[in-house]
Image: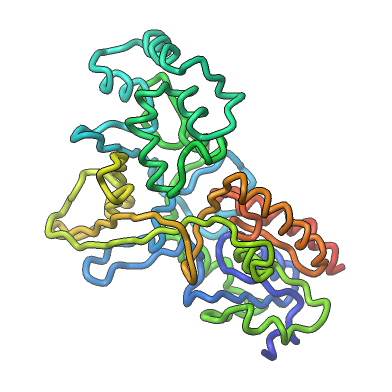
Amino acid sequence: MDDLYSCDLVVVGAGFYGATVAERAAARGLRVLVVDRRDHIGGNAYTEVHPETGIEVHRYGPHLFHTPNAEVWNYLNRFTGFTDFQLRVWSSHRGQLYPLPVNLATISQFFGRHLSPAEARALIAAQTEGLDPQAATNLEDKAVASIGRPLYEAFIRDYTAKQWQTDPRLLPAATIARLPVRYTTDTRYFSDRFQGLPVDGYTAIFERMLDSPRVALRLGLDWFDMRHAAPAGLPVVYTGPIDRYFDYAEGRLGWRTTRFEAETVAVGDYQGTAIVNYPDAGVPFTRIVEYRHLYPDRPYPADRSVIVREFPRFAAGDDEPFYPVDTAEDRARLVRYRARAEAEPDVLFGGRLGTYRYLDMHQAIAMALRDWETLAPRFG
């Protein structure tokens, strides 16, 4: 507990948001205490080497860095170089493999004929049921307005229900904005200017960000077991679940988590690509990730590979919450939690969990850089 009396700032959580604030504060000359209840840094971006095969695995699901933001890209490049990897995802529907996101090749293959961009646009327009994507208020209407009902039911509806454990009609339309639609044969999952994977993996980024004599790192400690000992007025940056901070006083927010089922297979290449989605309702998992394909140039074994099946579900009890579900009921609760947060002058709530927002990695970093500029004047 002595660290609480010798630091200028406490950062709760060592993911991208927390590590960015801690790094900026330490660079400013502040003494920073970083606390994380997990036994590792990096939050959900943590990577580790599989002991049997040497393949680098992302413990909490694959993280592919992409951003249109040059400031974020330049900031992160202080701590890592990037490969030129660009993600391409495939979807296994009724025994056939299709490229995602939905593009001209997907549409042509699904409807069984070679379509021009104009023909594909006309075909999809006839299947959108007159819905306006700009006016859609839920995920289903947004998706049908964008790609038509047949493609929605094939690739989105049941996958979404499995992924979010929620009827797509109850999810906000913004959830589907992460999946683009293209009338070209561009099969890249992301189209951002800056893309890649960190050359040495994600964990190395966090090690370098927090490698400062001004940063005290305490892992395996729960902030709620120690905050009572903090001096009055000590600034805290909190990146955990906002509802937990207030002891669920306004009720529990909806969170999604994932169970990861890893398997070492006795083949050098199990599925030929990094990610294959399984959108059909009869398949209990949402996707299979084969991690060797994230770094194809590494000398991984020729006779073994690591695959991970993902089984999303609602978070409950002591589960690690990954993503906000964000139903209308959740949003109503969040308004009340934000009012409580505004009454905590010494606490800054940030990151995906602290703000109850679906943030990509680059968005969490951008938020942290912006919030630090707001926080910094407090320290003179």
Can you name the residue that lies furthest to the right here? 380
Could you tell me residue 279's position as x and y percent? 32, 40
The residue closer to the viewer here, 153 or 54, is: 153
Question: At x 36% / y 61%, what residue is drawn?
Answer: 259
Colour mode of the rendering: rainbow
Left or right: 355 in relation to 265? right
The residue closer to the viewer here, 21 or 165, is: 165
Question: Does residue 31 sit above or below 352 in this rendering?
Answer: below
The residue closer to the viewer here, 322 or 235, is: 322
* Number of disc labels: 0
The quadrant of the picture occupied by the N terminus is bottom right
Could you tell me residue 215's position as x and y percent? 64, 76
Q: Quadrant of residue 226?
A: bottom right
The quadrant of the picture occupied by the C terminus is bottom right
Q: Quadrant of residue 236?
A: bottom right
Could you tell me residue 140's position as x and y percent? 48, 32
Can you name the residue that lies furthest to the bottom here? 2
Could you tell me residue 298's position as x and y percent? 28, 56
Question: Does residue 12 sit above or below 195 in this rendering?
Answer: below
Question: At x 56% / y 81%, what residue is drawn?
Answer: 221
Is residue 19 shown to the viewer in this render? no
Left or right: 52 in relation to 275? left
